[in-house]
Amino acid sequence: MANVEHGGRAGNAFGAGAAETAKARLKAVRIGLWVIAAVLAVRQLTVVLSTPKGERLTDLETWVGENGVLHVKGSLYDSSQFTGTPFGGLVLKPLTRSAEQALGWGWTFGTLLLVVALGMVVARALPKPVTRRASLLAAPVAISLLMLSLPVRNTLYLGQTSIIPVLLVLLGCFAVRGQRASGVLIGLAAALQPTVLLFAPLLWFTGRKHAAATTGATFGALTALAWAAMPHDSYTYWVHHLAGVGLGGKADDLGNQSLHGALLRLGLEGPLEIALFLLLGAAVAFLGLRRAVRYARDGQLLLAVAITGCVAVAVSPTTWQHQLLWVLLAVVGRVGKKTSDRYMWPVAVILVITLPAKMMLPNMPALYPLRDNVVLIAALAAALAVPFLSRTSEYYRRPIPTEYAPAVPARWSRVPLLPFLGRVLSRPNLLLELLLIRVGYSAYQQVRLAATGGTNTGGRVTAEHHADQILSIERFLQLDIEHWVNHAVVKVDWLRSFFDFYYTSFHFIVPLSVLGVLYARRPADYRWARSALGFATLFALVGFWLYPLAPPRLMPGLGIIDTVHGVQDFSKPDYGTLTALTNQYAAMPSLHFGWSLWCGLVIAILAPKWWMKALGLLHPFFTASAIVATGNHWILDAVGGAVVVGAGFGLTYLLQGPRPRTLPKPAEVSTREPVPVTGRTRS
């Protein structure tokens, strides 16, 4: 080995070649991530600057605009539109004239630079040891996630200053040297956002007592300076409004993701609500700060800072959407002993802090308390409940690896295109799967609602024109049986009731049942089938967008009876275009038939008995009959559904390779000694 390492030219050449290849790939990935971050930054800049002047940077306009609060003589809080501290007003007042002149470009570019600086600091603050790959890729990933997050998007759009306190805290904890400088920066952040004072106990109990004392002294000095310069405003803010309580929007607004706002939304008010808020706030502060200190002593200071920030989110009387960046920082915590579980927490946090709450949970009254407080729940989970791994845990750096099935030879040498999407034998994390399914379905609904072909009236004209095209093609092919089937079924009551029930019920029940059985019994095949279904649905959304199509029941003069929805009112120009749940002109391709065909094929391929296979294939047959009999689809819509399902299976094959024909049985593997290596493992 010594000869190979020190004198073997061939070995050195081979090693150097492999190292150069890996280095080139890492460089390409890094460049790609920076390009993504730049594109997201440009997009956010374009969105803000392309918005009409009266609609963008509305909060900043309220403060420093031509008739803004900071221009008006008298108290800053007379109109309750200024929600910052008196020190914030004292700092901003001298800048009002220049800010007014550069209200768009200057402020937006400055905010983008702050976001970039924040991402760079976060990347440097990752707990050690950090691999070289992680250190190189962390900065663009962090900046991209920040650009996508709702807090940053709201800050850019509204013209808020909420990024500055977060950046000052991170600079004080990770960038500057010396406890005095650290305390000054965090104290300055607290003077702008008082809940930042919660970081003083974190500093004190982690051995940085001088920094904690400096934080308090800086906060006190700056607040006293503002009090001396603006005594009336300081009294209004600190005494009359109790550190800003009641300023800005109503405290029970959905944007206030604090315990106070949640209790008000639950119907509590008065002394009972105040007492309960103080009690819960004290408990959250005590337990959360104790956890933060523990992780700071463990060497995970960035996680400790994120937990403390999540505590501040919960205990602040008002925590608006643009002040929720602390929740995103909690993504650095590691959760789970298995590799497959490691992504659950980061994905959940990113989705919560990036997507509207309505996409996270179904629109059901019973779930409104969860949906309305989803960001607060994420903050409380990070502060109190999520079992982040300690760096001393054996699973922190080396989680239980994922097992892969043996590769199956493909017809073409380039398949699979993405080898790392190997056939995983273990089950994916159930909570993560449910979350992704929910978000995917919400995105599906949003695209269907958006694909109206322009305006409602214009969309109807386009959709009916496309329906005439489909009908002409069917007549040419002698497939125009919709009217005959529809009227034949209507004449038989029990048959009409059967197809109505089948159309409205089995569309979701059967695919979810198939996915559930595969998840429980055949995890590897679950991943294969789920990918094919997802790709098929994605292709269908493209069809909805490009080719809005009126179903037979919405075609005037055709005489189709809508057996499910009842009598149609064609006198309304935009009738049928859009409902609260779906776009009625998203008919091509038919996902009713497409999903049923997917179910039938999966059952036919995987079911162990012939009668199961036959029963599975009956489902797409009954579905095709139902969509035609009820007047909801054309025959060619079903053909389109079959095409997208075939494309979904085909793309899955190209990306992941063939489905394994045989899978190792756990019982057999566990009884053999030694166990032969038949697959791959990935940590």
Image: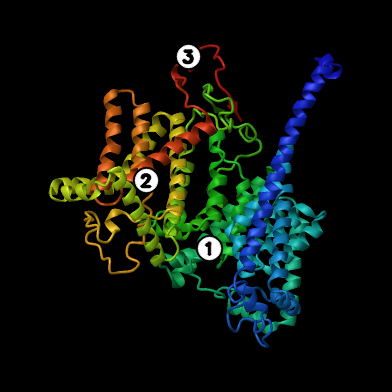
Q: Residue 258 carries which label?
A: 1
In the displayed structure, would residue 58 be above or below residue 164? below
Q: Which mark is residue 671?
A: 3
Assess whether mark 1 and mark 2 are in contact (beta carbons under 8 angstroms): no
Colouring scheme, one of rainbow, by chain, secondary structure, one colour: rainbow
The spot of residue 313 in percent (x, y) is 58, 60
Quarter of the image with the N terminus is top right
The spot of residue 291 in percent (x, y) is 61, 49
Q: Can residue 216 be seen in this view?
A: no
Assess whether mark 3 and mark 1 are in contact (beta carbons under 8 angstroms): no
Check disc 3: other Cα within 10 Å, few if <14, some if 14-19, many if 20+. Answer: few
Q: Can residue 263 be seen in this view?
A: yes
- The type of residue carrying mark 2 is Leu
Q: Nearer the viewer, residue 377 or 277?
A: 377
Q: Nearer the viewer, residue 607 or 139?
A: 607
Q: Which of 279 and 291 is in front in this view?
A: 291
Residue 163, quarter of the rendered image = bottom right
CA gap between label 3 and label 2 equals 45 Å
Tell me which residue sits at (32%, 65%) in the image.
Answer: 575
Check disc 2: other Cα within 10 Å, few if <14, some if 14-19, many if 20+. Answer: many
Identify the residue under disc 2.
Answer: 591
